[in-house]
Amino acid sequence: MPPPSTRVPTFGMQQRSERPDFYIREKTAENAEATAHRHEYFQIQINLGADTVHYVSNVERPFPQHAVAFILPHRVHLIPPPKGGRFVLINFDQNFLLPHLQCSPLDLEDVSIQQAPELTPFRFQAQVDFVLEGEPLAQVLALLDQMRQLDGNREFGTREQLKGCLLQLIGIVCRRYAQPLTALAAGNTAQRSRRDALARMTDYVRKHLADPDLDLKTVAAATYLSPNYLTHWLRKETGKTFSELVLERRMHLARNLLLNSTRPVGEIATLCGFADEAYFSRRFRQAHGLPPGQFRRRDAGV
């Protein structure tokens, strides 16, 4: 994926769709989103033009002609539009597809395929390339035409027909890729993916701990996660906020430097990401009951 930015845009249905529940439209290279972004809704993209790639989180997947991409809410992603590119986009909210599923969009990766099989291709988009040909492709193209017609002339009962078409599309892909999808579900790939993402976050924090401007948005962008998603995962996996995690690591580094080096307190403050020595001393005292100098002298037996 192109170099991350701290300003990864987030789009709501009202910004991209004419209706708040379901919307289907065609996209060309001229009107395609060319930067990494995320949205609050589900999205399916079908490539009807030239080959390209799909960046989802920190993973790059091929996205050739007749491939289908399934994108969860809040997932940072990008499909660079090739010259002559042509796509069909389907946007819909969680209540449209899964009205029975009363959970946050941030928890969708924890939902079992037994509870919501419709989520399966969305959960494993980073591991499987969904490319259609022959009869499955013909069926999906027919469903796209039907959805365009239904969405362009909404009447009583149309919403249910649209949902039926959407479920058929998902079902065709699930049936075509049943073996890898069920194997991934059995292997808890989603949970491992979350741990990998948290490991990337931890590594980034460790390497940039001295940066006083280190913050949630910067780290989320660098690890291709949304700030809300990263916050949610941290609380679920560690019980800590991002700020608590960073402060804990900075205090750990400060203790090591105080006890195992002769560096001045001001230099240690800088190495631990504090631009102000007085603020560093105050936070250190809150965490350890003593200011840095006294902590060093006490443990040195002075």
Image (spheres, rainbow, N blue to C red):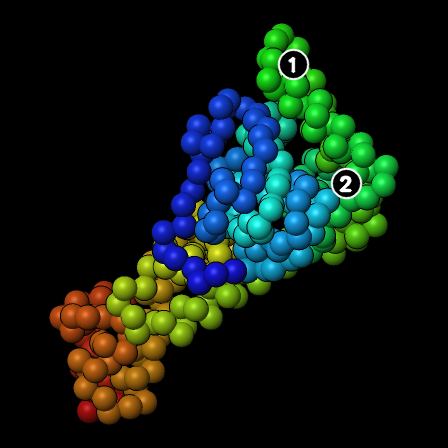
- First along the sequence among labels 2 and 1: 1
In the image, taking residue 293 as reference, residue 26 lies left or right, namely right
Q: Which mark is residue 32?
A: none
For the residue pair 233 and 132, the one nearer the viewer reads as 132
Residue type, numbered disc 2: Val
**Residue 84 position within the rendered picture, expressed as x and y whole percent measured from the top left:** 60, 46
Return the residue nearer the eye: 11 or 289. Answer: 11
Please tell me whether residue 231 is drawn above or below residue 152 in the rendered image: below
Find residue 189 and report its horizontal and vertical position in percent: 68, 56
Graded by Cα atoms within 10 Å as few (under 14), some (14 to 19) or many (20 or more), the crowding at tag 2 reads some
The residue shown at (27%, 78%) is 271
Q: Position of residue 60 (x, y in %)?
A: 61, 60
Asked whether residue 289 is in view, the answer is no
The residue singled out by tag 1 in the image is: 158
Note whether residue 203 is visible.
Answer: yes
Viewer-proximal residue among 45 and 92: 45
Instruction: Identify the residue at the far right of this view.
Output: 135
Residue at 52 percent across and 35 percent down: it is 41
Residue 245: x and y in percent read 39, 62
Q: CA distance from mark 2 to mark 1?
A: 23 Å
Q: Which residue is mark 2?
A: 173
Q: Is residue 5 left or right of residue 76?
A: left
- Quadrant containing the C terminus is bottom left
In terms of secondary structure, where does tag 2 sit?
A: helix
Q: Amino acid type of disc 1?
A: Thr
